Image: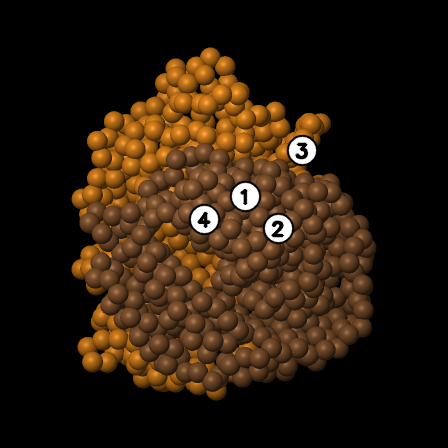
């Protein structure tokens, strides 16, 4: 398999439609998306082999009339271009009173470029039936480990992306794939029931399959310990975060606040802090589709801007935000390749990609040893941003109590971190030399516009309120 | 629906098939402050086909997407591939829903407007509430959607419905001292300009209060009051444990006859899952299998009374197919606003998101704005969290007499919970 034949067959149609619409709009781009995805899995009582929820095929046209942006999403671009252009223009009519309120944003640059990008993929080298057999084998392996497991699901979710981007001067295409294999189990011990999960991910199915058996012992141990978990006594503690929780902090606590469409709306406090200390001097943070290879890695964004590796925090100082084409145009900055859409049916916004803290110099064992009484927190559950006021809510699946510098066997679950973002980031006193990116995340903007993201980093030592 | 698709599926002599189609037409406006930044429109169709193969007393299925551009030859190849995959799936046997036809619509006054004019009227309603010197609407997004949904299966089921829905996302901001904001999202299929304006006005007052709010000077110990948004979140979490799919998979936290409110000292809770609710854009006549939606009371007087769910899992459990229900109604209680005013309380107005973990008996979350009433005066409070045992909170639940509608929730306007720590 390779780049979508369907999109290739529509290049000339797109160019003709751009030419037609250019009579009305000085800037016109067309993004064609063709995503193939599937979900293959099995639990104790049923199995599935079907279409994944990322599958889609269609186009979105972005236009600028010299003042504001206009977009139209459709399934195909064949047929009479003049008629199609007329239909598009008619459907984007603006009612009189609202039309008077239109912004005046500079036209985006349309720099010439013609390039094709592709990442190594093993799509097409495996049969869905073989993946199902693998999931069933892993399910049986997990079920055999503890008779208290009521159910266990193992599911593979591969997806392959083809994108075509065209303007009057630009013609880009890209092809890449990603796969997640996740597991979810339910274990009952007397009256107590727990649910827990884990997963592996790679750009290659072969690598994900190879990695999966390695997570089974940890998954079983976690479930067995979580049946004895207790609620945490609320308070402010010294905390060590595992890479998943470090990533959650990077993403929810700070990342959303540097999405520069929020700068345009005066919705981000970070706008006032560019060039100022927002974190401990040993704190460094980055975001970028080109920063690492993970689930949010691509070659160009949905605005046709090449992927970047953006330094956000340098030695504790906020140095840059991340932007899409529209916010960069409005702010007069260079776009950073962060324009992303949930699908061709949705609007493009400034979005995070792979967001993480950089590794430090401390050893994890020294970090744990430095805690008199506190917790080490593991595994992201969820989080919610507050870019305007930098309040945070980040929920970890569980924590393990640290007493006199040693991890105990006392589990607490769930654990909600809250507080003020700069207080948390400035409290970072140690940063481990280990580093891991968690490539299985999803992110909404507010409560919608879901895109795939990764986050992670090293272990951090922080002081934060837990409840 | 592509009529040729049905012909191609009929020709394939499958054990069964299902075609689900959704046509979405939208008109969208995006404002930065009061200025219009982006205008969007969409006209797209999504078609999913599920192929069924009966074998060895089992049923297998596999699905694929069909696009506007998919050719007949490609469809034939997709059908053949799906059939081979379905033969590898050995799920417990079940019948597809039987022949039934419907061509319906969910009532909505959106039909009275041109989408462009409707979006403009919604923008006017929001900005009419933006009248404060120190406050403003910093961002506004308006989505007007028209969905045409159909389900067709090989047994002769053929249903179609037209639905409308609006999403209005508003970011009210206050700039007195430190600039603060709140988040508001309204979802509805019946436009009432006065109601939308009133709702934004209330949020403007709340964001003003967030600007004036401070963390409490000393620890607070009093009952916690949750509003309709958080109550909807809590009640949907409880009802979510009662779906047929979870019961069949043994992953449900509650079972029939379980007391959700043990040793109840408050109002007994009754939750009913509904297929449609006046004004709710989640309303539907049938689910993704074409099953007619049947309202079902899942918790009655604090006790689990029924499960609910899809045609397939209903057959496995030998229970009636209610369909996948997406609206929820909760009963009113005994607590009046006067009752509430007679005691100290901590009323959460805006939270990052209510965290409910039924398995770990947890309820909590970060509070962005609350009002603390000491029995005499009321002050706005921020920078605080709540946490406690879910079981204790449910047992002490006092539901308001007043009922409100919000999105796909109809139920108490507020509820009072004991045993929650404010930290």
Residue at point 26%, 45% (across, down):
B298
Q: Spatial distance from mark 3 to mark 2, Cα to Cα? A: 19 Å
Residue linked to disc 4: A377
Residue linked to disc 3: B179
Q: In orange, which chain?
A: B
Instruction: Determine whether B27 is above or below A49 in the image.
Output: above
Using the image as rendered, state which of residue B186 and residue B206 is in the foreground. B206
Q: Spatial distance from mark 4 to mark 1, Cα to Cα? A: 11 Å
- Tell me whether marks 4 and 1 sit on the same chain: yes
At label 1, counting other C-alpha atoms closer than 10 Å, the crowd grade (few under 14, some 14-19, many 20 or more) is: some
Number of the label disc, if any, that sits on residue A462: 1
First-in-chain label (4 vs 1)? 4
Number of the label disc, if any, that sits on residue A255: 2
Mark 3 belongs to which subunit? Answer: B
First-in-chain label (1 vs 2)? 2
- Tell me whether marks 3 and 1 sit on the same chain: no
In the picture, measured across the screen, residue A345 lies left or right of residue B149, that is: right
């Amino acid at each position: 398999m390779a780049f979508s034949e369907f999109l290739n067959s529509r290049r000339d149609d797109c160019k003709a439609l751009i030419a037609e619409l250019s009579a009305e709009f000085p800037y016109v781009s067309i993004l064609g998306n063709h995503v193939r995805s599937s979900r293959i899995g099995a639990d104790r009582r049923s199995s599935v082999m079907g279409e994944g929820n990322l599958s889609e095929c269609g186009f979105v046209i972005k236009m600028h009339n010299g003042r504001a942006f206009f977009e139209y999403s459709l399934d195909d671009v064949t047929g009479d271009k003049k008629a199609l252009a007329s239909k598009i223009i008619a459907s984007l009519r603006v009612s009189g009173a609202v039309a008077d309120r239109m912004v005046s944003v500079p036209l985006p640059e349309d720099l010439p470029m013609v390039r094709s990008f592709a990442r190594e993929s093993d799509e097409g080298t495996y049969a869905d039936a073989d993946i199902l057999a693998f999931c069933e084998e892993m399910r049986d392996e997990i079920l055999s480990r503890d008779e208290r497991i009521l159910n266990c699901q193992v599911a593979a979710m591969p997806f392959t992306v083809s994108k075509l981007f065209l303007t009057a001067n630009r013609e880009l295409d890209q092809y890449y794939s990603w796969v997640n294999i996740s597991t979810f189990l339910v274990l009952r011990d007397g009256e107590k029931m727990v649910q827990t999960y884990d997963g592996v991910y790679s750009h290659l199915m072969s690598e994900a399959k190879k990695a999966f058996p390695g997570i089974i012992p940890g998954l079983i141990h976690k479930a067995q310990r979580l049946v004895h978990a207790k609620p945490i006594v609320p308070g402010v503690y010294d905390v060590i975060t595992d890479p998943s929780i470090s990533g959650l902090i990077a993403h929810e606590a700070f990342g959303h606040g540097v999405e520069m469409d929020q700068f345009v709306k005066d919705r981000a406090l970070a706008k006032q802090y560019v060039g100022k200390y927002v974190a401990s001097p040993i704190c460094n943070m980055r975001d970028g589709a080109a920063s690492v290879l993970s689930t949010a890695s691509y070659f160009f964004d949905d605005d046709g801007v090449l992927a970047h590796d953006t330094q956000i925090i340098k030695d504790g100082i906020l140095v840059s935000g991340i932007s899409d084409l529209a916010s960069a145009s409005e702010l007069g900055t260079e776009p950073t390749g962060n324009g992303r859409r949930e699908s061709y049916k949705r609007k493009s916004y400034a979005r995070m990609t792979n967001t993480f803290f950089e590794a430090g110099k401390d050893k994890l064992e020294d970090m744990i040893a430095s805690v008199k009484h506190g917790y080490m927190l593991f595994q992201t559950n969820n989080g919610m941003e507050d870019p305007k006021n930098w309040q945070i809510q980040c929920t970890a699946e569980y924590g393990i109590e640290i007493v006199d510098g040693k991890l105990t066997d006392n589990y607490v679950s769930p654990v909600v971190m809250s507080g003020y973002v700069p207080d948390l980031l400035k409290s970072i006193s140690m940063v481990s030399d280990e580093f891991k990116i968690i490539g299985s995340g999803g992110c909404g903007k507010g409560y919608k516009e879901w895109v795939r993201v990764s986050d992670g980093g090293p272990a951090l030592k922080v002081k934060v309120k837990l409840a | 629906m592509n009529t040729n698709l049905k012909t191609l599926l009929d020709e394939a002599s499958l054990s069964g098939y299902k075609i689900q189609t959704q046509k979405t037409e939208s008109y969208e406006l995006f404002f930065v402050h009061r200025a219009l930044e982006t205008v969007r429109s969409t006209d797209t169709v999504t078609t999913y086909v599920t192929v069924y193969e009966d074998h060895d007393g089992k049923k297998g299925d596999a699905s694929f997407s069909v696009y506007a551009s998919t050719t007949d030859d490609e469809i034939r190849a997709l059908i053949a591939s799906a059939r081979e995959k379905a033969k590898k799936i050995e799920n417990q046997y079940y019948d597809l829903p039987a022949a039934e036809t419907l061509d319906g619509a969910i009532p909505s006054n959106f039909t009275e407007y041109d989408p462009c004019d409707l979006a403009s009227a919604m923008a006017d309603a929001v900005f009419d509430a933006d009248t404060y010197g120190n406050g403003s609407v910093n961002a506004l997004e308006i989505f007007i959607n028209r969905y045409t949904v159909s389900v067709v299966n090989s047994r002769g089921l053929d249903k179609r419905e037209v639905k409308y829905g609006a999403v209005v996302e508003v970011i009210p901001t206050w700039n007195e001292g430190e600039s603060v904001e709140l988040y508001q999202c309204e979802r509805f299929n019946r436009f009432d300009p006065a109601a939308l304006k009133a709702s934004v006005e209330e949020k403007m007052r709340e964001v003003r209060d967030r600007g004036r709010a401070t963390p409490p000077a000393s620890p607070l110990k009093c009952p916690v009051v949750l509003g309709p948004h958080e109550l909807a979140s809590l009640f949907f979490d409880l009802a979510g444990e009662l779906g047929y799919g979870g019961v069949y998979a043994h992953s449900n936290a509650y079972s029939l006859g379980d007391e959700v409110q043990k040793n109840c000292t408050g109002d007994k809770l009754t939750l009913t899952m509904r297929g449609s609710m006046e004004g709710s854009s989640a309303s539907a006549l049938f689910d993704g299998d074409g099953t007619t939606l049947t309202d079902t009371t899942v918790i009655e007087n604090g006790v689990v009374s029924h499960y609910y769910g899809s045609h397939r899992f209903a057959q496995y459990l030998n229970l009636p197919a209610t369909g996948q229900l997406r609206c929820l109604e909760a009963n009113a209680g005994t607590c009046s606003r006067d009752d509430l005013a007679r005691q100290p309380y901590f009323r959460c107005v805006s939270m990052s998101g209510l965290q409910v973990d039924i398995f770990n008996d947890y309820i909590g979350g970060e509070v962005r704005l609350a009002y603390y009433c000491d029995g005499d005066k009321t002050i706005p409070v921020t920078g605080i969290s709540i946490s406690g045992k879910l079981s204790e909170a449910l047992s002490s639940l006092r539901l308001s007499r007043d009922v409100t509608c919000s999105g796909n929730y109809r139920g108490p306007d507020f509820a009072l919970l004991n045993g929650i720590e404010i930290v």
